Image (spheres, rainbow, N blue to C red):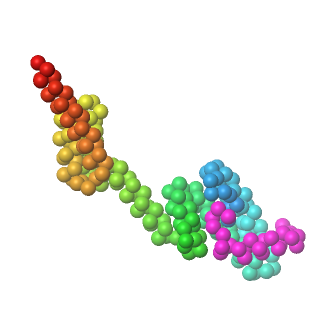
Amino acid sequence: MDLDPSQMTELWDRCARLDQMDYFEVLMVERSSAPADIKKAFYRESRTYHPDRFFHLDNKELKDRVHDLYKRVTEAYYVLRDDAKRRQYTANISGPERAQKLRFSESSEAETRAASKRQVEEQIGVHPKGRQFYQTGAADADAGRWASAERNLKMALTYEPANTRYKEKLAEVQKVLLDESRKQGDAFKIR
């Protein structure tokens, strides 16, 4: 593959800007791009900048820069194809520390994993017994067994007293129990 002077200039320019480019710029896609578009861009860019296409170049520095560009294209795809990593990365590069966050590091990945784990734990709970009692209580509530639902949800909260989801579900059940109690009281007064 021979490059004409304008292609060579463009290649040098792209390689020179690599350290200032975020992953969206590396793949030449918009931040709102669909996963399929990101995949197409990855294949396009990885074919274009594959180091084997530049083996004939005499300039070792340019070969090394093309290799770095190719690695960055692969890195960009690795991050942008994963929804959680993409959200974290987009948040990172949208902030005031953009220049320091252009590369998705191992610590960024650890933060993303921890955030995902926290989100799941907040949804279903961290303690197996707490989850079990919550699920039983939720099933009782769905079936209209309000007293049983209240007991099971209170048990779930003994294992996870700070779980917001458990507290909210218990409050819903207790409201229904209170409303039913009031209705029965009103019916008793009418007699």
Task: Locate the C terminus and report the quarter of the image it occupies.
Answer: top left
Q: Quadrant of residue 144?
A: top left
Q: Residue at x 30, y 51 (%)?
A: 164
In this rendered view, identify the residue nearer to me: 82 or 71.
Answer: 82
Instruction: Please check the rendered image and state whether residue 9 is part of the magenta-colored stretch, yes or no.
Output: yes
139 w.r.t. 24: above or below:
above
Q: Magenta segment: does it hold 113?
A: no
Q: Main secondary structure of the magenta part?
A: helix
The residue located at (29%, 46%) in the rendering is 168
Q: State the image coordinates of residue 16 (x, y, percent, origin top left).
A: 72, 76
Q: Is residue 103 visible?
A: no
Q: Quadrant of residue 3?
A: bottom right
Residue at image location 40% in from the left, 62% down from the top: 114
Left/right of residue 138 with respect to residue 178 in the rendered view: right
Query: As rendered, which of 67 and 154 lies closer to the eye?
Result: 154
The part of the chain drawn in magenta is 1-25
Residue 125 against residue 173 in the figure, above or below: below
- x and y percentages locating residue 126 in the rendered image: 30, 54
**Which quadrant of the rendered structure holds the N terminus?**
bottom right
